[in-house]
Image (spheres, helix red, strand yellow):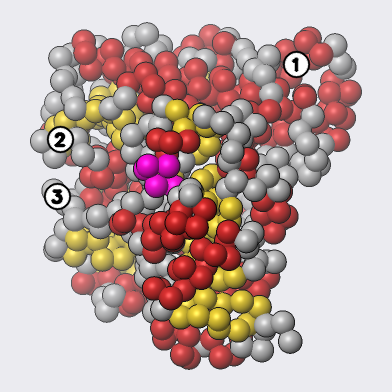
Amino acid sequence: MIVLGLHLFHDASMALFVDGELVDFVEMERMRREKHARYLTSREIVRFLADNHLSLADIDVCTIVWGENDAPMLMVDWYGDLEIETGSNDRVVSYQDYVMAGHPAISLPDGTHPQRLFYVSAITPYIDPRNYASSYEHIAAKAVFTDKLINRMVKQIRFGIDGNFAKATFFVSHHAAHARYVVACSPFRVALVVSVDGLVGNSFTGGGIYFYIGHSLYPQVAHASPTGSIYSFFGSLLGFEDLSGPGKLMGLSAYGLPVFCDDAYVGTLTELSNHGLVDLDRGGVTPLFRQRFLQNIQNMTGQSMAQLQQQLLAWDMWSYPPALQANIAASVQEMFRRNIVKLVDSAVRFAKRVGLTYEGICLTGGAFLNCPTNSFLYARYRRLFIPPAINDEGTALGAAMMFIAKPKLPAHLAYLGRSHDVASFVNQELPAYLDRLQMIGSGEEAVLPQLAALLREGAVCGFYHGRSEVGPRALGHRSILARADDCQMAARVNRIKDREPWRPFAPILTAEMAAHYYLDVPADSYYMLFNATVKNLCLPAVTHVDGTSRLQIATEACGPVYRLLKQYGQLCGMEILLNTSFNGRGEPIVETPRDAVESFLRLPLDYLYLDGYLLARRTV
C-alpha cells in the first residue's frame, strides 16, 4: 500500500510510505529555500511523486493535514489544477474576488499569485462535549474508548491534480497527526499523549489529550490551553514577529527574571475568559489580553505607556538585552511553563482517575520545542518521550501513519529527510566552483582526523552528511561545528551566521561526556529538546547565561559526526563540539550539496566537510 502525507500550511512537508516503510520525506522550506514555507503547491506535490516514479493516481491513500473547525477552511489553488470535494459547504472564489473582498494578498516568493481559492469543510470537532476542559483542575468527565471518535479524526474527501485522483483521500485532524507521529516513534506500547500548539481559537485549536493503546489512538480531552497565544502575542512586544520568534524568546528569557508574570494568563480558555482576556464566542483574544500585560509592566516600572513603547522600540536586538526586554521574555516563558506544567499534571491526574496504566508520556506539538519546560517536566515525570519533528512539518508523517498500523522508520529518528548524491555533485557540479574552492582531502578515514586537528586549532567547519534532519534543529548532518571550550567561539560563530549576539549555542557530545560535564542529563537527549546544567565553566561556547546547555548526545547511528567526536577526543580529551545549524541569517538549513557549497561561500567558514570530501577556500 502506498500512502502519501501532505501538510499544506506553514512548515509545509510531504511524506511517502510504501508498505509501511518511509521512503521519502521533504520539508518544503529546505527545498524551496524559504523559511517556514507556508504553502504546498500542486506542482511540488507532482514533482515529489515523480521523484519517486509515481503519480497521484498510484496513491492508495492520500492524507491532508486539516483543522477542526465548524467553519470552512481555505485551500489555495496556485495553478488552477486542483480538484477537491469535501462537502456541501464547498465553494470556489477567484483570487481577484478574494483580494477585492478585503483579504490580504497571497503569493509565493517568486511573486506567483494563486488562480483561485477553495473554501472547504473542515473536520467536525471530534471530542465529546463533556470532555472540554473548563479548567486544568477538572478536564474531563470520563474516558472515551469508542471507534466513533477515532473515525471522526479523519474525513474522507475527493482530491485530484490535473485530472489524476488518489484512490482515497482523507483530511486528518491536525492534532491527531501530531499525536500519531509521536506514538509511532515512541518506545511505549501504552502512552498518555499531550499535543500543544496553535493560537487561541474555537473547537480543538490548541491541542488535546489522547490515550494510545494497542496501536489505536483515543482522543480524550480538548484541553483549550492558551500557550501558543502567550508566546505569539507577547513575543511581538520584543520584535519577534515571525515563526522563529519562540526560539529566540526562549533564549532571551534566561537573561531576565519573571517579575511581570501574571497568573491570570495561566489556565484554560474558559478561565482566561473569566478575566476578560479571551472571547469564547468569537474564538480569539480580546484587546485586554495585551493591555493587561502592558499595564502590569507600567505599574511595576512606573513608566507611561509612551515611555514603555519607546523603550521597547529602542532595542535593536544586536546588543546585550536590556533588563526590560529580558524580564518580559522571562515572564512570558514562566507563564508558558506554568500552563504546560498544569496541563500535563492535569492529564496525568485524568489518566489516574480513569484507571489508565501507561508506560510513559508522549509530548508533541510545537510547544514542546521549549527546552526549559521539557526539562522541568522530565525532572517531574522521567518517563517522557519527545521526537525531533514535533513542529508542524511532522504532521505530514503523522497523517500518513494514521493509515499504517506499524510504520517502519529509520533507526535514528532525526534523519528521515532526503539523501543526495554527493559523489555525483563533486564530479559534475563542483568543478564550476573550483575557482573559489580547493579540495584538500577525500575519504572519511583520511579526512576526519584532519578535520579534528583543524577544529582543535580553532577552525569553524560546515558539516554535511547523508539524510537531512527532520525538525527545526541541525543534529550533525547539516551542521556548523566548532570548539566548545573556546570562550570567544560563541561570539565568532554568531558573527559568521549574522545572528543576534546573545543567542546561545548547543553542544553535540558523546554519552560519556554528557555524564562527565553535566548534571541531571535527561534520558533521550538526542534531539536538542532538553537542557542540562553544566558542572563547571570549562565549556563557555555552549553554556548559556543560566548555566545550562541544550544537549545533543551523539551515537554511532549519527554517522561520521560521531566518529569525528571520537577523533577530536583523542586530540583534546573531550568528545564535545559546538553544533549549530548550517545556514545564514534568514536562510533555511542547507539541504543539497549545492546548498552547502553556496552557503559555505557566503558565510566566512573555514572548511566544509561534504560527505567524505574536505574543502577550503582557494587563497590564490
The vertical placement of 175 against 341, above or below, is: below
Which secondary structure, mark 2?
loop
Foreground residue, 417 or 26?
417
Q: Bounds of the magenta span? A: 508-513
Residue placed at 31% from the left, 65% from the top?
Answer: 24
Question: Do labels 1 and 3 touch, CB within 8 Å?
Answer: no
Residue placed at 60% from the left, 46% from the top?
Answer: 485
**Is 337 left or right of 61, judged from the image as shown?**
right
Task: Give the quadrant of the N terminus.
Answer: bottom left
User: Whole-percent x and y of residue 611?
Assistant: 43, 73
Q: Earlier in the sequence, mark 1 or mark 3?
A: 1
Within 10 Å of disc 2 (Cα), the crowding (few <14, some 14-19, many 20+) is: some
The vertical placement of 602 against 40, above or below, is: below
Assess whether residue 468 is covered by the magenta stretch: no
**Is 29 left or right of 493, judged from the image as shown?**
left
Rendered image quadrant of residue 309: top right
Foreground residue, 384 or 301?
384
The type of residue carrying mark 1 is Ile
Mark number, residue 297: 1
Mark number, residue 406: 3
